[in-house]
Amino acid sequence: MEIERHEYDVVVIGAGGAGLRAAIEARQQGKRTAIVCKSLFGKAHTVMAEGGAAAAMGNVNSADNWMVHFRDTMRGGKFLNNWRMAELHAKEAPDRVWELEAWGALFDRTKDGKISQRNFGGHEYPRLAHVGDRTGLEMIRTLQQRVVALQQEDERLHGDPEAYIKVFAECTITRLLKDDGPAHGPHGAIAGAFGYRRENGRLLLFEAPAVVLATGGIGKSYVVTSNSWEYTGDGHALALLAGAKLINMEFIQFHPTGMVWPPSVRGILVTESVRGDGGVLRNSEGRRFMFDYIPEVFKKQYATTEEEADRWYTDQANNRRPPELLPRDEVARAINAEVKAGRGSPQGGVFLDVSTRLPAEEIVRRLPSMHHQFKELADVDITAEPMQVGPTCHYVMGGVEVDADTGAASVPGLFAAGEVSGGMHGSNRLGGNSLSDLLVFGRRAGAGAAAYVERLADRSAARPAVRREAVAAAQAEALAPLERSGENPYEVHHELQRTMNDLVGIIRKAGEISEALEAVQKLKERARNVGAPGGRIYNPGWHLALDLRNMLLVSECVARAALMREESRGGHTRDDFPSMSPEWRRKLLVCGASEDGSTVTVEERIQPQMRDDLLTLFDRGELEKYMTAEELADFDSLVK
Ligand code: FAD
């Protein structure tokens, strides 16, 4: 069977914010770059991002700076974050936002003409650069425009707009290919990627020494999710199958506010900006219940009365923040608890009200997408009545373990950035920190990949070569579901989604997680026999049959790590281990898999200790909430 072949220096898988920024960087550094994306070009999660990109520019409150942002990020992640990533992110995010503006992004402005910044949960100061509630759209538009500008330059210089950067849209990568080592490392280096065109089923082979994974999240393993169809954990699984490691997979962010009604739209996101702009959460008794759920670690920073919380919107210097703006994990658990206690809204959520808090014109101006979304999908006018909202699976903190500075994974030639990578957000991501993460680490991964290709050339090392047998195996694997008339893949998918939602969801217990693991094993067996007859021309059943391997693998990682971590932290709440443990904070859970994905292993690893100058940005009183006695003794000798 004929395979379409292409040769590049760098192949970027994914065309969201991280992928586009990585590709721009690799091309700017002179590398021939392919961007491959499963959906239409321009359709990625990033485009759906509403609230904004967090960057400590200090435009609205000059007290903001990278150190405050770093502290907020570490607090939000409950100190499990890769501190080097959190540091780079906080330091570089403003430059990346300014760079976007230089490339043509039009952010909302303050009265004195600076880029406006809005409040968001867990951020001490207004920090999210935004474009109404359509920030992701502007980000993608700008990055695409930058790609086009580079292509125009290439046309002038080389007579071919696609000479150095080319987009392959609606193409799914199903396997990463490696050489057979040991020239590039004991286990082989990346040599390319294999996939297919969704439209006509044509097989594709990219030969390239560097691959950047930028495939986004895993939400489609859950029934109630804000994620769209393409978020099936492909990059996570591709990395695992190539021998790389995943970290923090037990941490899944359930966004507190997804739509709960009507059922067809359950899970669709209601942006946190609604709360950032004054919206409040109430239960069926009309009580602003978040005041009842301020955890000990956050008591100092959050208002304890409605009066103080309301004053904060106009005077942030002299008042503490409303508890509706606690980090997402806290708010999601609180909503879950209210619903369970029988104080939920008629359709099983709670009420989110902005209608009594802002004039109607202001709501429409600040939250145009939300206004439109509720009117169109639920026939609710949010300027006149409250919304009903509940938790929805939104973001995976876990992902490919990478080097903070270069985005390099443990397999030579493999890089990752954006939601598919792990570490930056620890156990819980702050809203707005993803869009800035994409820009900061997308750029770094693109530069890392370009430098790697450069080093190969400097050493005059032969480019890693794709093995014929590996291509044949990838081809056989990709075509197998077409040749079977087995079970319908949609049934297996639906059972997986229910299993993960019900047994490894927002609140977890050992017995239920074990039950989920048994179910996943059985589903893995069934997935081996799913069939998708009907040919290769746009056959969504075939596509899903291939995606199932990834969702099952990633779900197994989530469940195994969730069973092992016997504490509650951020996006991992164990009913049977309700508190945070300083011992566990020091540990990362690292997932690996066999080449065929049949076995998943999880190992504990001790986190590297935070650099002294970063550690001393925190008060001892705060560190006491997270650290072991031994770590605190080290801190004491440091500040003596
Ligand atoms: P994505 O933007 O998810 O792009 C992934 C790309 O990979 C896509 O092009 C996809 O087609 C491609 N892909 C996947 N698998 C394959 C494969 N096998 N082969 C080829 N291509 C593949 N974060 C914020 O910071 N601020 C916000 O305001 C915000 N709002 C959000 C609102 C919503 C509704 C959602 C869902 C998320 C929001 N987030 C927000 C989170 C943020 O948008 C995402 O985390 C981020 O956009 C992920 O970007 P990414 O570049 O990593 O991947």
Image (tube, rainbow, N blue to C red):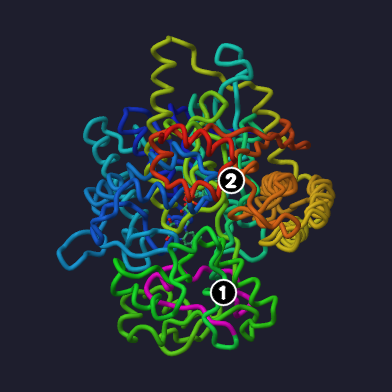
Q: Position of residue 294 (x, y in %)?
A: 53, 67
The part of the image, by quadrant, that contains residue 368 is bottom left
Q: Is residue 578 above or below residue 151?
A: below
Residue at (77%, 44%) from the top-left corner? 483
Residue at (37%, 32%) from the top-left corner? 26
Residue at (21%, 65%) from the top-left corner? 110
Q: Observer-nearest residue: 25 or 149? A: 25
Q: Observer-nearest residue: 262 or 401? A: 401
What is the CA distance from the residue labelled 1 to the residue labelled 2? 30 Å
Residue 263 on the magenta segment:
yes
Q: Observer-nearest residue: 583 or 512? A: 583
Total numbered circles: 2
The part of the image, by quadrant, that contains residue 354 is bottom left
Q: Which residues are drawn in magenta?
A: 260-283
In this figure, which residue is indicated by the disc labeled 1? 292
In this figure, which residue is indicated by the disc labeled 2? 398
Q: Position of residue 307 (x, y in %)?
A: 39, 81
Cβ–Cβ below 8 Å for labels 1 and 2?
Answer: no
Report helix, strand or loop for mark 1: helix
Task: Count neighbours of disc 2 (C-alpha within 10 A) and say few if under 14, some if 14 to 19, many if 20 or more.
Answer: many
The part of the image, by quadrant, that contains residue 399 is top right
Residue 319 on the magenta segment:
no
